[in-house]
């Protein structure tokens, strides 16, 4: 068990094309779920586990995100403005020096989860073992996701914490990658300059036997389309949730 990382990167630069027309004038991370923006939900979760420093990257409608972030006191936020979209891997690599040699959280700013008995981010930190991991993913059973028509991402055998990317092995995926993860900076060794997908690093970690997964014990919601977002808001409407003072 380690002390949860004190730094994090929140991915908020995407265009959100599948969420149109809602994202024609509003960046996807700023869409509301049960009274809070998805971006605030991610930042609140980080503050709740003691994260102090966060990088938020911006590109599409970045000025809207930056203006909103001015209202937050916690955590301390550094904005990484992208003049060309660097994708999920390139965006993080651009700011890699911010994290030094310590593992850090990476969160998507457009996912929604509810913690179980132990906060998901704390559970990730409790499970982290730098000696055998470069990347630790929070996973959720694909058959438990409301309004989800996808096929999942990983096959995870019972009793194992080493997920297998199902498409590469022709396996039936039984888990979805939920967005939150812990990553060690060394995973970026040899990564290309410019735009590239973080998924390339997932595959690298798996190939090297240094990809692990943790089963999320709370809830997770698919919010990739306007219809899924509306369904999630209906499910969570009025549901009490723990919030942090920001």
Image: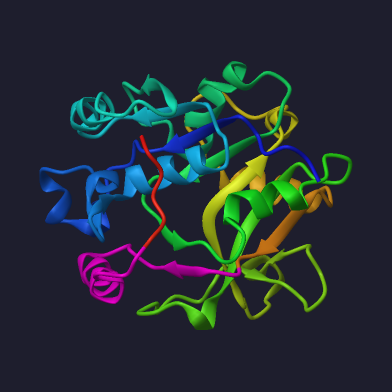
Is 214 placed left or right of 237 in the picture?
right
Magenta region includes residue 236: yes
**Quarter-of-image position of residue 30:** top left
Residue 200 percent coordinates (x, y): 61, 45
**The residue stretch that appears in magenta:** 217-240
Residue 167 percent coordinates (x, y): 62, 69
Residue 225 percent coordinates (x, y): 26, 65
Number of numbered markers: 0
**Quarter-of-image position of residue 42:** top left
- Image position of 76 with respect to 132: above or below: above
Is 32 placed left or right of 83 in the picture?
left
Of the 4 image quadrants, the one containing the C terminus is top left
Seen from the viewer's position, the closer of residues 11 and 123 is 123
**Residue, far right:** 131
**Quarter-of-image position of residue 166:** bottom right
Residue shown at 35%/25% (left/top)?
73
Is 204 placed left or right of 78 in the picture?
right
Seen from the viewer's position, the closer of residues 193 and 27 is 27
Magenta region includes residue 147: no
Residue shown at 62%/78% (left/top)?
174
- Image position of 213 with respect to 8: above or below: below
What colouring style does the render use? rainbow
Seen from the viewer's position, the closer of residues 26 and 74 is 74
Residue 33 percent coordinates (x, y): 27, 58
């Amino acid at each position: 068990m380690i002390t949860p990382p004190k730094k994090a990167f929140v991915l908020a630069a995407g265009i959100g094309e599948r969420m149109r027309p809602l994202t024609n004038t509003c960046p996807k991370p700023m869409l509301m779920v049960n009274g809070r923006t998805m971006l605030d939900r991610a930042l609140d979760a980080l503050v709740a586990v003691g994260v102090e420093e966060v990088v938020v990257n911006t590109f599409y409608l970045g000025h809207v995100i930056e203006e909103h972030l001015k209202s937050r006191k916690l955590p301390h936020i550094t904005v990484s403005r992208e003049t060309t979209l660097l994708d999920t891997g390139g965006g993080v690599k651009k700011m890699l020096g911010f994290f030094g040699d310590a593992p850090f959280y990476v969160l998507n700013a457009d996912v929604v989860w509810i913690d179980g008995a132990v906060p998901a981010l704390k559970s990730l930190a409790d499970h982290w073992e730098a000696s055998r991991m470069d990347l630790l993913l929070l996973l959720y059973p694909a058959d438990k996701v409301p309004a989800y028509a996808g096929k999942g991402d990983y096959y995870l055998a019972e009793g194992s914490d080493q997920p297998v990317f199902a498409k590469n092995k022709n396996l039936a995926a039984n888990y979805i990658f939920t967005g939150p993860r812990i990553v060690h900076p060394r995973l970026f060794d040899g990564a290309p300059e410019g735009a590239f997908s973080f998924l390339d690093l997932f595959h690298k970690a798996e190939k090297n036997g240094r990809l692990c997964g943790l089963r999320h014990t709370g809830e997770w919601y698919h919010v990739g389309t306007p219809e899924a977002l509306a369904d999630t808001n209906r499910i969570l409407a009025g549901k009490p949730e723990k919030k942090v003072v920001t």
